[in-house]
Image (cartoon, rainbow, N blue to C red):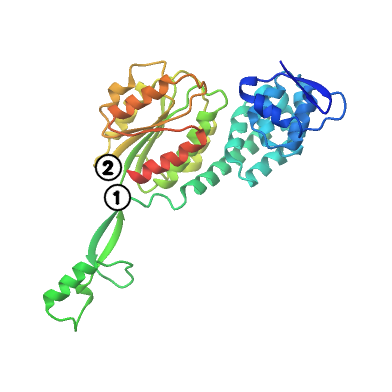
């Protein structure tokens, strides 16, 4: 319990002083609470003022009862404070969601989509979908799908332009590039520059080198659906940027699931269908990286070509199966993107991920935030 005064009043707020003491101190002179103060009063003032991270609101609301959580969620909705809504859902998902499943809540969610608050909106979806009445679940799913597609387009831009092969061909009208050196050589060999034809000009075409990739996504037991948010965004990104290439997507926890196989026509698995499958899946179970890598390797072996690689996205903390670095040795290239662990003390996963990447002849990409994973994947797709 931590006590401090605001304008002469003594307020007791249950907070984690190791993480939020300094932040609360900074609020002393900015929050204004006129009458007898309580945790609810402080929380109300913080919601109205805004500008705080979810953890701040979460710490203030830990001791509040059901009715106060519900009232504060309504206040957060009125003030368009998405961070406070997230925090209140973590504190008491039943109380907060009862305020969210209203006409005001539906308008709030639609407004979040308009404001492109993608990751926060997706986190809210995965937290409340099991409790949502049918009409709100349909709305949430539609908004979440739209948000995933918007976020994908924003991240991907023009796709993966690198990896283009320059091919010399006979020039024809309308070509954008030609090989100046080779054209000059042809002209010199003729001995005259007076009569140059299209046959003397060497044109250049750029052909995209075909890539073959297997994306292996860890969706095991994430408390607030972060692994599924990541799976939805990275799946959408991969499908959008790699539609001219061959790719497979595998989700795993205790076991693995083939979301899309390498030789499956993308027209049979459009991005909206893949997103919907992830939105309907559960982040449960243990973590068996070895099993997922075995399936990924088998899928990669179904295609020919030199440009073959896999990307594993996980926190590395496996609790089923054998050492995954053993099977990783059999991959031509296996890159590892390391998700930030929910328990910050679990650094062992970082070592495991580095070991897997080294064994798989690939690179190791630790990220500090889930929001960085899609852009990291895009970097890998462009550079391989």
For the image, the number of numbered tags is 2
Q: Nearer the viewer, residue 66 or 264?
A: 66
Of the 4 image quadrants, the one containing the N terminus is top right
Residue 325, percent from left and from top: 31, 23
**Can residue 343 be seen by looking at this rendering?**
yes
**Mark 1 secondary-structure assignment:** loop
On the rendered structure, is 245 left or right of 9? left
Q: Going 41% across and 22% down the picture, which residue do you hit?
A: 349
136 is higher (above) or lower (below) than 289: below
**Mark 2 secondary-structure assignment:** loop
User: Dividing the picture into quarters, in which one does residue 9 lie?
Assistant: top right
On the rendered structure, is 39 left or right of 362? right
Image marks 1 and 2: residues in contact by CB distance under 8 Å: yes
User: Dividing the picture into quarters, in which one does residue 43 lie?
Assistant: top right
* First of labels 1, 2 by sequence position: 1
Q: Going 53% across and 29% down the picture, which residue do you hit?
A: 226
Residue 340, percent from left and from top: 48, 28
Q: Going 47% across and 41% down the picture, which residue do you hit?
A: 236
On the rendered structure, is 376 left or right of 290? right
Residue 76, percent from left and from top: 74, 34
The residue at the far bottom in this view is 194
Counting other residues with Cα less than 10 Å from the Cα at mark 1, is it few (<14), some (14-19), or many (20 or more)?
A: some
Counting other residues with Cα less than 10 Å from the Cα at mark 2, is it few (<14), some (14-19), or many (20 or more)?
A: few
170 is higher (above) or lower (below) than 165: below
Residue with the mark numbered 1? 209
Residue with the mark numbered 2? 307
Residue 139, percent from left and from top: 65, 38
Q: Going 74% across and 32% down the picture, which residue do you hit?
A: 46
31 is higher (above) or lower (below) than 62: below
15 is higher (above) or lower (below) than 34: above
């Amino acid at each position: 319990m931590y006590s401090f005064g605001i304008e002469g009043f003594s307020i007791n707020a249950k907070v984690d002083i190791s993480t939020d003491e300094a932040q609360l101190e900074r609020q002393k002179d900015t929050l204004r609470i006129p009458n007898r103060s309580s945790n609810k009063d402080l929380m109300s003032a913080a919601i109205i003022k805004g500008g705080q991270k979810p953890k701040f609101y979460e710490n203030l609301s830990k001791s509040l009862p059901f009715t106060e959580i519900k009232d504060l969620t309504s206040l957060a909705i009125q003030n368009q404070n998405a961070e406070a809504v997230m925090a209140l859902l973590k504190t008491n998902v039943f109380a907060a969601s009862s305020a969210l499943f209203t006409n005001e809540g539906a308008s709030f969610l639609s407004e979040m989509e308009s404001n492109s608050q993608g990751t926060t909106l997706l986190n809210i979806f995965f937290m409340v979908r099991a409790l949502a009445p049918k009409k709100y679940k349909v709305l949430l799913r539609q908004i979440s799908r739209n948000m995933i597609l918007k976020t994908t387009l924003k991240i991907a831009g023009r796709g993966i332009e690198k990896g283009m092969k320059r091919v010399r061909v006979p020039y024809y009208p309308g070509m954008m590039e030609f090989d100046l050196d080779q054209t000059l050589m042809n002209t010199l060999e003729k001995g005259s520059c007076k009569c140059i034809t299209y046959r003397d000009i060497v044109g250049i075409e750029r052909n995209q080198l075909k890539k073959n990739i297997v994306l292996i996504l860890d969706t095991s037991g994430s408390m607030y659906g972060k692994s599924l948010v990541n799976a939805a965004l990275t799946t959408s990104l991969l499908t959008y940027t790699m539609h001219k290439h061959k790719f497979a997507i595998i989700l795993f926890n205790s076991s693995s699931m083939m979301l899309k196989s390498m030789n499956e026509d993308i027209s049979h698995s459009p991005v909206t269908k893949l997103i919907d499958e992830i939105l309907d899946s559960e982040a449960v179970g243990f973590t068996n990286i070895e099993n997922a890598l075995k399936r990924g390797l088998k899928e990669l072996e179904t295609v020919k070509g030199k440009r073959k690689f896999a990307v594993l996205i996980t926190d590395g903390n496996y609790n089923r199966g054998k050492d995954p670095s053993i099977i990783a040795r059999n991959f031509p290239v296996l890159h590892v993107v390391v998700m930030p662990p929910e328990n910050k003390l679990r650094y062992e996963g970082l070592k495991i991920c580095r070991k897997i990447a080294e064994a798989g002849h690939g690179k190791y990409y630790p990220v500090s935030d889930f929001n960085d994973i899609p852009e990291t994947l895009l970097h890998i797709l462009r550079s391989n």
